Amino acid sequence: MTTSPIDIQPDEHGRFGEYGGRYAPEVLMPALLEVERAWRELRTDDAFWTELNTLRRDYAGRPTPLYRADRLSEHIGATVWVKREDLMHTGSHKLNNVLGQCLLARRLGKPRVIAETGAGQHGVATATGAARFGLDCVVYMGAVDMERQALNVFRMEMLGTKVVGVESGSRTLKDAINEAFRDWVANVEDTHYVIGSVVGPHPFPWMVKELQRVVGDEAREQMLAQAGKLPETVVACVGGGSNAIGIFSGFVGIDGVRLVGVEPGGLGLATEEHGASVSAGSDGVLHGARTRILQAPDGLIREAHSVSAGLDYPGSGPEHAYLRASGLAEYASVTDEEALEAFHTFSRLEGIVPALEAAHAIAWLLRERPSGDVILMLSGRGDKDVETVKNLASQDAPDGRPS
């Protein structure tokens, strides 16, 4: 059996099969083409990778460990290996992407960066990168998310970033992206938009994937070194999907390795209160790319729902849509209740408080109980979610667990 994954690359139009592309207003095309040209130069520049890899090691803390979770393994009847992206500087995988894009902004001569954020993890990472490189930074965040992620808002402000609350629409991640695009259109001469996931128009899904694939490459090498074999299953949560694409990149197309993306099932797929765009959505265009989205029969974008602010998005990255269509990965969902239960169970079994996003992948493991060796992508730590979980628990069972 080969241990080498398929290297999936978009075509010259930025498409993964029928998904992806660049659906953008004319005023934004010069900026997108500029970013693509700069990225094509950087990705073949040895000096860029040397600098980025040094930053990853000395500043961000890579490589992150692959940890055998013995108590969880005993609980579900499989051997679970946890890729510990929660141990990255800033507490999630997001800095992998941000450091590369800050170097890109420097190459472009752009002294200002902007970003969107839902749970605040990408916002904190962008604020961190901006401070490290001396860039002005503005982060757009839905007003609802600012309330449930107040700690991360304060962290961003401590790092010198201006956080702008978005009151339009559902006041969540989708609307924050809309406002960030508006800013970029108005300030493109001196501003680079650090998109936080594998979403948006080409080249962003491709570029963010290439910057996150370090996770999958590390995990594959670590698994072979520590277990002497590849896993039977790799599981990760999916909202926009950068953490999942990152780890899937190390295993996609390898015979015998099952890739599972777990989406937010919210209150259930039978309701409209969920965010499972890949498994329960339909094809359409959102934020500049053709992908799987949540939309009404008239084509209007439906609001997504998730207990996790980081998964509260009505679309997914186009490469995820391609992986589903090609059969290279499968997608499932878990409910808010299942994710909250998994948050508590993992914390108590392993002494690690997971981000609510990652708790969705844990919930799938607890429900489905796959056999063999399993890699669980722990995309971030759960400090940011403790207040949310506490508030929900106070409305529920007296022992602090969801009823």
Image (cartoon, helix red, strand yellow):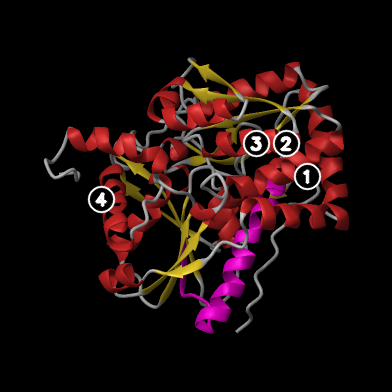
Residue 266: horizontal and vertical position, in percent? Answer: 33, 40
What is the CA distance from the residue labelled 2 to the residue labelled 3? Answer: 14 Å
Task: Find the distance from the CA under tag 3 to the CA under tag 1.
Answer: 19 Å
| Res. 343 visible in picture | yes
In the image, 35: left or right of 325?
Answer: right
- Vertical position of residue 145 compared to residue 308: above or below: above
> For the residue marked with disc 4, what is the amino acid?
Glu
Labels 3 & 1 near each other (Cβ < 8 A): no
Picture disc at residue 341:
4
Label 3 is placed on what type of residue? Answer: Ile
Closest to the camera, between mark 2 and mark 3, is 3
Which residue does the numbered mark 1 point to in the structure image?
A: 13
Query: Would residue 226 be counted in the magenta stretch?
Result: yes
Q: Are marks 1 and 2 in contact (CB under 8 Å)?
A: yes
Please report the bounds of the magenta region as a residue range.
206-235
Give the SS element for disc 1: loop
- Where residue 22 is drawn, which disc sits there? 2
Assess whether mark 4 and mark 3 are in contact (beta carbons under 8 angstroms): no
- Mark 4 Cα within 10 Å, few/some/many (few <14, many 20+)? some
What kind of secondary structure does the magenta stretch mostly adopt?
helix
The residue located at (67%, 42%) in the rendering is 98
**Nearer-N-terminus badge (3/4):** 3
Q: Are marks 2 and 3 in contact (CB under 8 Å)?
A: no
Q: On the image, numbered disc 3 is attached to which residue?
A: 195
Work out whether residue 21 or residue 215 is closer to the camera in this orientation and state it.
Answer: 215
Q: Residues within 10 Å of mark 2 (few under 14, many from 20)?
A: many
C-alpha span from label 3 to label 4: 31 Å
Tell me which numbered mark, 3 or 1, is placed earlier along the sequence: 1
